[in-house]
Image: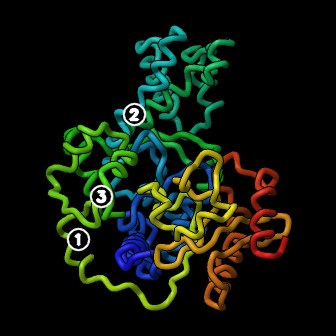
Amino acid sequence: MTELTDKLRAWWSHRQGLDGGLAGATPAEVLERTGWARSVGGVGPYLTLFARAGTSREAADQAVANLEIHELPSARGCTYVVPASEFALALKAGESFGGGEMKTAYKLGVTDKEVDKLSGAVLKALAEGPLDPEEIREATGNASRHLGDEGKKKGMITTLPLALGNLQASGEIRRVPVNGRLDQQRYRYILWRPNPLDSFPLTAEQVQTELARHYFHWTGPASLAEYQWFSALTGKAAKAAIEPLKLEPVAGDRLMLPEDRDQFEAFQIPKHPQYAMVSSIDGLSLLRRDLNSLVEAKDYSHTLLRREGAGAGVPDLPSHGIFDRGRLVGLWEYDPAAESLAWMAFVPKNKDLEKTVQRTEEYVRTQLGDARSFSLDSPKSRIPRIEALRKASGKG
């Protein structure tokens, strides 16, 4: 481990607001400062806000209800929870990634005209108020159709999701969680008026440059390859996107915004631990998707970090993570049956670390009820990971 490695880790943690600097900030402020929170039907967005600002679940849900933050299809066509000031940018960033389902639909005999007609019927139905998918299907009658056994094989049962996806991506409608929570995937749909894209001035090329500016502000220094993964651009397009930013090289092939350079050079590694417990898809690790840079080499020999065919490491966290000044120092899962956290540490345990664990455990138990990594994660599927964590911590 080098001093530069230590500094990079601590700097990334600082930029991600995991050093206490965002305590008490609003959900929108957290996401503007540290980046959009990846959303896959798990607790990721809640833990993003709690770890940085101490945000309660109730406050996060209220921010969603007030449309201060919202879950949108965005970079790479993936869903993120985004602040209101960046709704239009996020939608535009995901615009070019929405054609995959239509390519499949064409093979099933679906036409653009058919989907456009269905989209019009959906908008007409939603003019009466919010509806769930079944209610929309009933309200639109034969405007949508079943795609038969062949469609079922391809994961496309009816044409309705095509229209809903297109309308979401274009900012015409938005989906809201049925019970107001971000860690489930049951939605109703509502018209979005005014459409956030109506007065958005940036061209497609300008959108990619602005997305790059945000990205390197959230997590620079980062490599071009890391940005390319986040944006899903080709190498040529990624280079074109960052060219106007005049990024400066730092630590080999890593790049950062010139306006952040002086802050980075002056930054001092905190002397005392700054423990943070985050989700398995937290921006600290997911934005660059380079877990190697956050893990001590000796820790990669641990069975909990080894993966078949993964070579020298893994790109993603295998469980929720515990970090100290940007270094991965532990892993954790929640056990609903025991109403407690199962966790282990790569470093000696101490009172500050245990206090952080207790605080997070209370938050999950009293406010979330569980800590699913993603929509299909369940207490049953989590049992092997929980047992492995307890064994590693000496409590198995």
Q: Amino acid at mark 3?
A: His
Quadrant of image for the N terminus: bottom left
Q: What kind of residue is marked 1?
A: Asp
Q: Which residue is disc 1 drawn over?
A: 260
Rendered position, 180 above or below 148: below
Q: In the depicted view, which residue is nearer to us: 319 or 23?
A: 319
Query: Cα distance, mark 3 to mark 2?
Result: 19 Å
Q: Toward which corner of the image does residue 94 lie, by quadrant?
A: top left
- Residue 31, located in which quarter of the rendered image? bottom left
Q: Nearer the viewer, residue 131 or 242?
A: 242
Apparent side of residue 211 relative to residue 179 in the rendered image (left or right): left
Q: Residue at x 41, y 44 (%)?
A: 74
**Is residue 310 shown left or right of residue 393?**
left
Q: Is residue 291 above or below residue 14?
A: above
State if disc 2 and disc 3 touch (CB < 8 Å).
no
Query: Sequence-wise, which precedes: disc 1 or disc 3?
Result: 3
Per the image, the residue denoted by label 3 is 214
Nearer to us: label 1 or label 2: 1
Circles 1 and 3 in contact, beta carbons < 8 Å:
no
Q: Residue 377 — which label?
A: none
- Give the crowd class for mark 1: few <14, some 14-19, many >=20 residues within 10 Å: some
Q: Which of the labelled discs sits on residue 97, or is there none?
A: 2
- Nearer to me, 340 or 265: 265
Residue 257, percent from left and from top: 22, 64
Question: Where's residue 157, x and y in %?
Answer: 64, 21
* Label 3 CA crowd tier, 10 Å (few <14, some 14–19, many 20+): some
